[in-house]
């Protein structure tokens, strides 16, 4: 079988044989930043009612274990912790994304490798390498069929995430190439996830990421015990993973295999600076610059216009009545009108602000003065003041988040939950993760502080 006929073998060989020194330092640096960002986002999500409710549901039937439920104050089995922590990372729509693959890799891979690493007492170096393996595998599968999973109403993060988490977990368990092949095959039978999870008003983001992490760990544990999969060509074969979820003929296996282990997609993961779709980033950047440049007084704003493409208008400005008066935080953060009003009034958009200003009369009054203009060539925000002065900012490209901003986001999210000192300790350990002897040194800091 030629190399381009067996993506399954390419990924299993990659996961089983990659050496730590084969990964460039810039990839490790990026991975550490994504890990730090994900931990902070998970800790913030742990304060949500839905997170606490789900944790109680699981804890009520759990016999306990050695893996930490981040920010929730109890131990669970690796499967339970992977589920909960994956849910937390993705729970506020604040986690990282790979734009070319159209999925959120860290929300599935990190909870899987940390939960399994805890119970095995593994080092930070081992966990980090497995994290890179899982993210890279997951991203490349997404890039093989960009947009095709969503088009068939499947959620690519959880669907593909099961495979990535299984390979990462198999790496942590030290599985042979043959056992790794069985892991991948088993993972494809456990894959699931509906796009409905991010399309309904009663958004329950994150549970699909958590189930992806849980299923990936399960696949690796089963393979370790000798359970065999269905087929060695589980990804590309007849009735295989890609035919089932992307659609026959809708994928390019070259994107999986070309340069695997040499050209690293993980280094291009985009870290969000706002708890909403990355597609809203550019107009929010423009609006926040307007606020900071002009020290806007909201009462002096007569009208706000913004330029966006038709696809984003359809997602974030329509239906207009619902978006102008959001009934939930999810609708609010996917409303151009609401998030632009926040940006112009406060010069920031974060989870705390979304939660506290959902029914704020001044915010809603300003959002009523926001209108859009279809523009397929650029993004811009224009403010007309009552004095007649017009202020405008343009943002035509998607700029990466600075490391300084990512670290600030981590501390803003983590410190209220675990305390400033513990947050600082976590940051220091993640920065030198290759030197951490046991991943439990990190996770023991992720319990809520006692008030």
Image: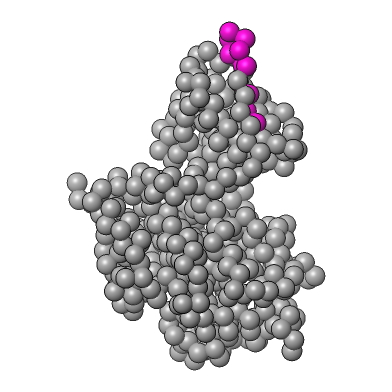
Taking the image as shown, residue 73 lies to the left or right of residue 26, namely: left
The question of residue 388 being in magenta is answered with yes
Give the image location of residue 200, x and y in percent: 60, 46
Residue displayed at 55% across by 57% down: 269
Closer to the camera in the image, 419 or 289: 289
Give the image location of residue 29, x and y in percent: 45, 62
Taking the image as shown, residue 394 lies to the left or right of residue 133, namely: right
Quadrant assignment, res 333 = top right
Residue displayed at 38% across by 45% down: 408
Closer to the camera in the image, 172 or 186: 172
Quadrant assignment, res 241 = bottom right
Residue displayed at 60% across by 39% down: 282
Closer to the camera in the image, 29 or 323: 29
The residue stretch that appears in magenta: 380-390
Quick check: 311 above or below 246?
above
| Residue found at the far left of this picture | 451
Quick check: 181 above or below 65?
below
Q: For the N terminus, which image quadrant?
A: bottom right
- Number of numbered discs visible in the structure rendering: 0
Quadrant assignment, res 5 = bottom right
Give the image location of residue 428, x and y in percent: 30, 58
Give the image location of residue 174, x and y in percent: 44, 85
- Please say whether residue 213 is visible from this viewpoint: no
Magenta: main secondary structure: strand
């Amino acid at each position: 079988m030629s190399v381009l006929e067996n993506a399954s073998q390419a990924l299993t060989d990659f996961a089983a044989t990659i050496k730590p020194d084969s990964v460039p330092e810039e990839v490790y640096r990026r991975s550490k930043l994504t890990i730090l960002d994900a931990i902070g986002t998970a800790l913030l999500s742990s304060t949500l009612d839905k997170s606490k409710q789900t944790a109680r549901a699981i804890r009520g039937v759990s016999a306990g274990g050695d893996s930490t439920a981040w920010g929730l104050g109890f131990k669970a089995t690796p499967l339970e912790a992977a589920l909960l922590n994956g849910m937390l990372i993705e729970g506020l729509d604040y986690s990282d994304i790979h734009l070319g693959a159209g999925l959120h890799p860290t929300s599935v891979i990190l909870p899987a490798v940390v939960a399994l690493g805890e119970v095995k007492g593994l080092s930070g170096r081992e966990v980090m390498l497995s994290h890179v393996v899982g993210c890279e595998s997951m991203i490349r599968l997404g890039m093989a069929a960009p947009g095709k999973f969503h088009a068939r109403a499947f959620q690519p993060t959880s669907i593909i995430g099961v495979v990535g988490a299984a390979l990462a977990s198999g790496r942590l368990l030290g599985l042979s190439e043959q056992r790794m092949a069985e892991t991948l095959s088993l993972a494809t039978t456990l894959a699931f996830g509906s796009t409905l999870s991010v399309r309904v008003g009663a958004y329950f983001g994150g549970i699909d990421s958590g189930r992806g992490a849980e299923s990936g760990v399960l696949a690796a544990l089963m393979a370790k015990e000798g359970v065999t999969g269905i087929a060695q060509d589980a990804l590309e074969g007849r009735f295989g993973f890609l035919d089932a979820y992307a659609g026959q003929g809708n994928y390019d296996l070259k994107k999986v295999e070309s340069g695997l282990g040499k050209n690293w997609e993980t280094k291009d993961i985009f870290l969000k600076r706002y708890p909403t779709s990355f597609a809203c980033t550019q107009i929010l950047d423009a609006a926040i610059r307007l606020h900071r440049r002009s020290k806007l007084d909201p009462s002096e704003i007569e009208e706000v216009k913004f330029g966006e493409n038709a696809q984003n208008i359809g997602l974030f400005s329509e239906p207009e009545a619902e978006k102008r008066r959001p009934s939930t935080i999810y609708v609010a953060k996917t409303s151009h009108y609401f998030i632009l009003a926040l940006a112009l009034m406060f010069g920031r958009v974060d989870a705390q602000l979304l939660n506290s200003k959902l029914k704020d009369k001044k915010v809603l009054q300003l959002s009523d003065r926001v209108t859009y203009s279809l523009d397929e060539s650029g993004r811009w925000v224009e403010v007309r003041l009552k004095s007649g002065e017009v202020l405008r900012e343009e943002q035509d490209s998607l700029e990466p988040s600075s490391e300084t901003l990512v670290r600030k986001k981590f501390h803003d999210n983590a410190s209220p939950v675990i305390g400033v000192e513990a947050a600082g300790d976590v940051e220091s350990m993640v920065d030198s993760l290759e030197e951490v002897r046991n991943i439990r040194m990190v996770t023991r800091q992720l319990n809520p502080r006692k008030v």
